[in-house]
Amino acid sequence: MKIIAIESLRWAAWPRLAVVRVHSDSGLVGLGETVDKLPGAVAALHGTIAPLALGQDALDIEGVWRFVMDNIMYHGYAGAELRALSAFEMALWDLMGRHYDAPLYHLLGGRTRDRVPTYNTCIGFGAIDDYARWQEDAGGLAHSLLEGGIRAMKIWPFDPFSERSFGQYISLADIERGLQPVRQIRDAVGDAMEIGIECHFRWNRASIERIARALEPYNILFIEDPMHAVYADEIRAFSQRTSIPVVGSELLMTRWQVRDWLEKGVSQILMTDTSWTGGIAETRKIAAMAEAYNVPLVLHNIAGPVTHATAVHLGAHIPNLFMVESVRAFYRGYFHDMGDLDVQVEDSALTLPTGPGLGVNLRPELLARGDLTREISEGEGLARGRRAMGDHWAVEEIR
């Protein structure tokens, strides 16, 4: 089954998302997806990956991935090319599932759980503005989430106070302001709701330790990305000085960056994003590495229905899952406009997608929308076989 075309789709209505379609000579089409910084990722997909992947066997996922990765690594790999490769590889797995009429979790070796634990990241979109609600009435939002079967939520109440000092200092008054939604949640629902605190890499260690000391009485589920992942030693020192588990980091790309993080014992919980870190197989390898260190894994998931379905399949498969992130404002909103994925939450867990591959199909009318930007690469490609490695200065060298 040969790859004959690679297509990218973007819509102005959802500017953070790019959907990738991989077409095969069997007529089957696989779906992939990536999120954020799309101009670079789409350019890398068509300019770097497509010439190497076109004409290859779509079922040789590991071989094709390795061939493309060898070329990407020649100039460094943790950027646009890797986001594009993640979406492309995701589509190959979907294509394989459609070819064999099997869901992704079966292709990976089956399930370790029937339902996947989740927390709600309180982003707003459209009619569901959970972002505004946690800032205005976090207790009321907690009640709403509990009524919907969700018992864990993530908010980022200290972020605004990092801007004045560039994260170098936070005052006691600002800490009190940041604690307000946390107190509202505890006052409204007690310990019925788990609370995760996102920090978006904004603080130095002195400041985040001050924040953590104030949070400790509230039985916080985790603190995520308190500092940028480049400061691994500082994050490790912080994680040893607080009783709150530390999560990090979605910024670690591939098993090679994760390896050093795990060897140092930087955080109690690892996080990765399948649409950024290299794809489905790479996420599985990262999970296995983390399991060897007895470290659980969070799957970062703030994209569209294709990435969401991928995260749930992986969450069902890997044994050391902590939780899969999810955003109800997305799956109750634009997911329905994009495709047929039906997301259900029961007892704070996500039910598994049904159908072959990822279990997601785009709505046909998406391809006729006026806000669609569509690019396609097709033909034989430049690489015949997978013998060539590294960067090449002439087309003849990769024939």
Image: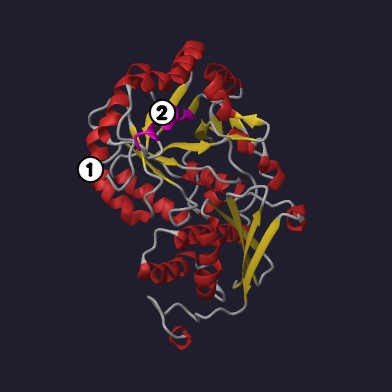
Could you say which disc has been placed on residue 390 in the image?
none
Question: Can you give x and y, in whole percent of width and height, for residue 283 in the image?
Answer: 43, 51
Type of colouring: secondary structure
- Say if the magenta span includes residue 165: yes
Residue 273 visible: yes
Label 1 sits on residue: 233
Q: Residue at x 68, y 31 (%)?
A: 127
Q: Specify the farthest residue to the top.
A: 187
Residue at the image point whose x is 62% and y is 78% from the top: 379
Image quarter of residue 319 = top left
- Is residue 164 left or right of 335 when viewed as pictured? left
State yes or no: residue 295 in magenta: no
Q: Position of residue 137 (x, y in %)?
A: 55, 18
Dot 1 surroundings within 10 Å: few (below 14), some, or many (20 or more)? Answer: some
| Mark toward the start of the polypeptide (2 vs 1) | 2
Task: Tell me, for residue 158, which label it has, or none.
Answer: 2
Identity of the residue drawn at 59% across and 80% down: 380
Along the viewing direction, whichever of 305 and 309 lies nearer the viewer: 305
Give the residues in magenta: 154-166
Q: Which image quadrant for residue 389?
A: bottom left
Report whether 104 appears left or right of 29.
left
| Disc 2, SS | loop
Q: Nearer the viewer, residue 392 or 323?
A: 392
* Mark 2 residue crowding within 10 angstroms, few (<14) / some (14–19) / many (20+): many
Examine the rendering and report whether any part of residue 339 can be seen: no
Of badges 2 and 1, the one in the foreground is 2
Residue 292 on image: x %, y %: 29, 45
21 above or below 173? below
Indicate the secondary structure of the residue bearing disc 1.
helix
> Mark 2 belongs to which amino acid?
Phe
Left or right of residue 375: residue 224 = left
> Are the two marked residues, 2 and 1, in contact with CB atoms closer than 8 angstroms?
no
